[in-house]
Image (cartoon, grey):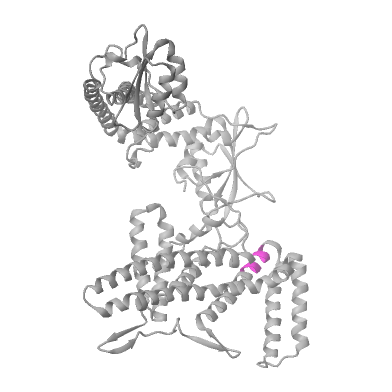
Amino acid sequence: MLKSEQMLKLRIVAAKANRKNIIKKLHELGVLHIVEHKKTEELDIGMPDENSEKISEILVKINSLLSGTKKIEADTTKKNEKIVLTEMEKVVNEIETEIVEKKSKTDELNKDRSEKQEILEKLEVLNNLYLNLESYLPLKSVTAIVGTIKGKEVIKNLKEKIAKITSKNKLHVSENGKHTAIALFIERDKQEEAEELLKKYSFVQLDLEFIEGMKGLPVTHISRLNSEIQKLKAKKEKLIEAIISIKTKHKKELVNYRNQLSIEADRAAAPLKFGETKDATLITGWVPKSKHEETKKEIDTITKNKVLIENLNPEAKESIPIKLKNNLLIKPFEFFMRLYTLPNYKEIDPSFLIFITFPIFFGFMLGDVGYGILTLLLFWSLKKVVPAGKDLLNSMMACSYWTIIFGLVFGEYLGFERLTINGILHEFPRLINRMHGSINIMGNDIHLVLVLGAIVGFVHINLSIFFGFLNEWKNHGIKEGILAKLSWFIFEAGLILVTLNALNILRFPIYGSVALIVLSIVMIYLGEGVQGLVEIPAIFSNMLSYLRLGAVGLASVGLAVVVNEQLAMPFLEKGGWFILVAILILILGHSINIALGIIGPFLHSIRLHYVEFFARFYKGGGKPYKPFGLNDS
């Protein structure tokens, strides 16, 4: 529960002739985390299977054919069926050819439609000028300059400037359209001068080559082009429907092919991680101890005992893959370890500790029966909508249960602590009054939930020190564990005795208390060096950081009370249609508070674990266990 799966390092040496069978069996077992071989003078890197390139090529085609289709699961009963690559390739190529032909026609239609659309847009500009298309045809001495300018207010000024170039001109201006369209008919030898002038007016010239062969008003051609574009659109839609139909028809077959070929692709590429000589193959990897004997037996059987399997000792600084080992209740909380960093092989897996304390912290902060029920329903519903978030949502459901429990402890129901029935005020039963409960410490009234937060912090931090001691003991010996970690308990004991003595609560020789503190500081220095001394003030700030458990809760219940008593209640008391306003206020107010109540406690709880709790025993940096094969998780 507190330890990851024990791993053993294996080395498999076999004849090259047995390589394919060994790979297949390892893939079926799905338990060996392969360690990639690095080329040496004695051992080269293995070559992929001869079919590797062909498999990859077919897979690329299948993925392309399945793009844009709804995801479906492959038929797992077919995953171990014998594959005939030539048959698969033939089927895939036939489907691809059929689709490519239709896509090619679609591209042609798109090109044709785009060209017609471009002409249509130009005709719409000319249409605003109400001139026959023949008018724009070039003459021997007169030319037409057609295009758009920004704004109609410059037309008067433009006419004056054109008149200075030549009096022999005719300017037509559109009365509607997105831009002001103009058609300037001017002497051919004045064309360049006129074009230079028009540039100053942000003029965009229209190329008139497209009107060659057209006659009459632009509107007649606009109508024709719109009709042609619609026909092209309809043809394209039919082709797309045909493509979808082909993909749908062969989808299941292609998905099964992809599943089978993906398996073969993994197997074909596996030798790239092996060491090889001319006649032998060497495979190194990690396997869970619980699967060691089964793996050895299966490989021996498949090779008829013509294989050497030996256990290896890990190198001093070798990174051992981590496979977390937790029961179904704790497993969802492994999410928080993957979010942060996996434990290294030699330290405790904190998943169980997070399973205990994370929901409690969350529930303590939110602590409302109504909010707990609503968030429970929310997380349960989201599990169906977002299956990929199942682990996180299961964890959050546990948080909701604790929210309900603490809601009962605090006597809070959607922010209500009391209820008036027939003019009589009824307090909800509770163990602790979160909003008003206080405790007197040295003449000062302090919120009880803040004090409880500090107590939780003291316990939680000391728990982390204890687990740090276990890690140090296991990895470096009992002496290092005492100096680096148990020394903190001695320091705290000395400090507590000094404090109790100063408050006249417990009489104890002051010299003995101070001696404990000095001794512990020396031990901390010997165990952790200067870094340990720097951490002495930090341990108190870390404990005080747990005050947020109470503070966040007070903010949450405070907002709920404001929504209920100051915003909604005045409307409820007025009665009539004001009750609807009150209900809307309650729904909106509590929705906001629940959203804040999920985000705040989640972030604060996760911070208390990652920053305060993990600091004294957890280093992380573990490499995830990634087995080669069908059971790869």
Above or below, 445 relative to 414: below
Q: Position of residue 419 (x, y in %)?
A: 31, 84
162, above or below 299, in the image: above
The answer to whether one can see residue 529 in this image is no
Coordinates of residue 132 in the picture (x, y in percent): 25, 17
Q: What are the residue bounds of the magenta stretch?
A: 467-474
Residue 15, quarter of the rendered image: top right
Comparing 522 with 283, the one in front is 522
Does the magenta-highlighted stretch encompass residue 179?
no
Q: Nearer the viewer, residue 108 or 287?
A: 108
Percent position (x, y) of residue 383? 36, 57
Does residue 286 appear to the left or right of 55 in the view shown?
right
Query: What residue is rendered at 33% in x and 65% in y?
Result: 377
Quadrant in the picture for residue 279: top right
Judge whether residue 473 is colored magenta: yes
Look at the picture and state if 217 lies above or below 444.
above
Residue at (46% x, 84% y) in the render: 436
